[in-house]
Amino acid sequence: MRFEVLQKVAIALSQERSLAALLKRIASELSHCKGVALARVWMTGPTEQCEFCRTNPDALARGERLHLSASAGRPIHGGEDWFRLDGEFHCGGAKVRQINDQGKPILIEDIGEDDKWIERPDWARRERIRSFAGHPLLFGGEQVGVLGIFARSAIKENDFEWLRVFAVAMAGTIINARAFDEIDKMRRQLEWENSYLREEVREAGGSPILGSSAGIQRVLEQIEMVAPTDATVLILGETGVGKELVARAIHERSPRHDRPLVKVNCTAIPRELFESEFFGHVKGAFTGALKDRVGRFQLADRSTLFLDEIGDLPAAMQPKLLRVVQEGEFEAIGDEHTRRANVRIVAASNRDLKKAVRDGRFREDLYYRLSVFPIEVPPLRERKEDIPLLAKYFVERACKRLNRTPLQLSGSQIRQLQKYDWPGNIRELQNVIERAVIRARLGSLTFDILQGAEAQPPAEARADPESVAGNEIVTEEEIRRRERENIAAALKQSKGRIYGPGGAAQLLGMKPTTLSARVKKLGLKKPD
């Protein structure tokens, strides 16, 4: 066998930058040399970084350091795939291991006369393998792997020397390719993080967790307990109670705080885009995939991923999420390569997930994986003593953001805010105050919750002046009955429509969001 093509191959290899592509090119080019049956490249590296070894308990126990990374050949008989990397000799045979352990080459000119190296004599006879040459891949004192050639003709000393020269050049090229891969990975990671941080800055402005009520103090204590750990957290609470603030507080108090908190709103993602959003995709994976896209799990590597409204996760995505939560492994769409990510999960939901599990809409095993440490955030109506502090904060922030003269809240205004049930919780309080600041004239704040049912008697009572004049007193139960009947009548007149002109909210003089919450609370059904 002669290696006249090696110089040409070495020049061609200098054009490859990707390490995986480089190794594949080496094996392919060498397998086409005259007399070569099979060419293989083993690379050194930790067991857990090999996609084949990390799923093999025996390999993990042995702590394998050598891994078949490229293979190409031309078998005489069909039935064997010489390109596969996970076969019997993935971690090398006896001669390959000796080359790796001792850092010295091995040449067997005639396998028939040196049978101590034959591990599969039937294979050697069937494929007419006569000789073997193996060189350690050494560069600058660093050993990166082993190059092995199985030939059907004798490998002479001059060919073996040529192969040594090629192995040295190849080792240097591998070192460069590995460095380029690492630099490119870091560059892409920085681009993803910068892009995400810009998005975070645009969305910044959330309030801190404020309050001295027993409920909010319990939440703060739970945050302090769980934040330093890597435990998965499930945050439960109604819409608008501040579940994202709790998630952010957990992240900022964790060892992962120096990396950005990555967020996914499971309600906002179209069903067909969930997998791409979570795990990413490669160029050409589907129509419209014009370039590679990194998924949120890869972006959140060594950080925290906040999965908001996890109860809206489609059933088809639940086993895939369970796998990555359990094993930290996933595949991008269109990519066969298994990727790993060290991600801490913080999930949130405004739904009763236990009921969803009972109803078969949410996987039980996923629920228990997510709820290692549950935190329940109380609604604003259960912590009304916190309203003065929250209202003062929102007024100050709104005045500053809207360039308004600083405004003050009076005691009567605070009491007015505390009388309201806040079905939209803190988010609704913030919006009400911001609207009041926008409309403020001569330093006076007026809240539009005054237009709701809480600020005025039911319509029936307003329509009956005699009952008012006569100081008629009714029980709390009667008030609720009248309110129910009144809302039911408005729904019937508006044909079940709550929003817009002629809607039930307009008929009742209520905010549509308030009426929607009241309809739900009273268990009313829209008329058919």
Image (spheres, helix red, strand yellow):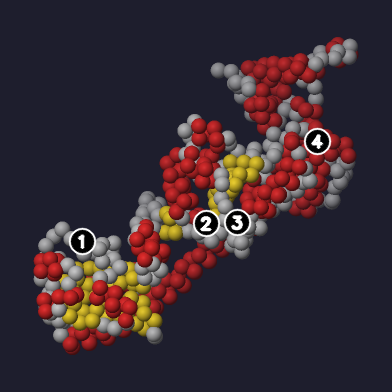
Q: Do the residues under discs 3 and 2 have CB atoms within 8 angstroms? A: no
Q: Is residue 19 visible?
A: no
- Crowd rating for badge 3 (residues with CA inside 10 Å; few <14, some 14–19, many 20+): some
Q: Amino acid at mark 2?
A: Val
131 above or below 369? below
Nearer the observer: mark 4 or 2; the answer is 2
Picture coordinates of residue 516 (x, y %)?
65, 28
516 above or below 294? above
Tell me the residue that label 2 is attached to.
343
Going from N to C along the chain, the mark reached first, 4 or 1, is 1
Tell me the residue that label 3 is attached to.
229
Nearest the viewer among 119 and 412 is 119
Q: Amino acid at mark 4?
A: Gln
The Cα–Cα distance between marks 1 and 3, rounded to whole angstroms, is 46 Å
Nearer the observer: mark 4 or 1; the answer is 1
Dot 3: element: loop
Nearest the viewer among 246 and 87 is 87
Picture coordinates of residue 313 (x, y %)?
50, 41
- Crowd rating for badge 2 (residues with CA inside 10 Å; few <14, some 14–19, many 20+): many
Picture coordinates of residue 170 (x, y %)?
31, 80
Tell me the residue that label 4 is attached to.
418
Q: What label does residue 81 carry, if any? A: 1
Q: What label does residue 428 carry, if any? A: none
The Cα–Cα distance between marks 3 and 2, rounded to whole angstroms, is 12 Å
Going from N to C along the chain, the mark reached first, 1 or 3, is 1
Going from N to C along the chain, the mark reached first, 2 or 1, is 1
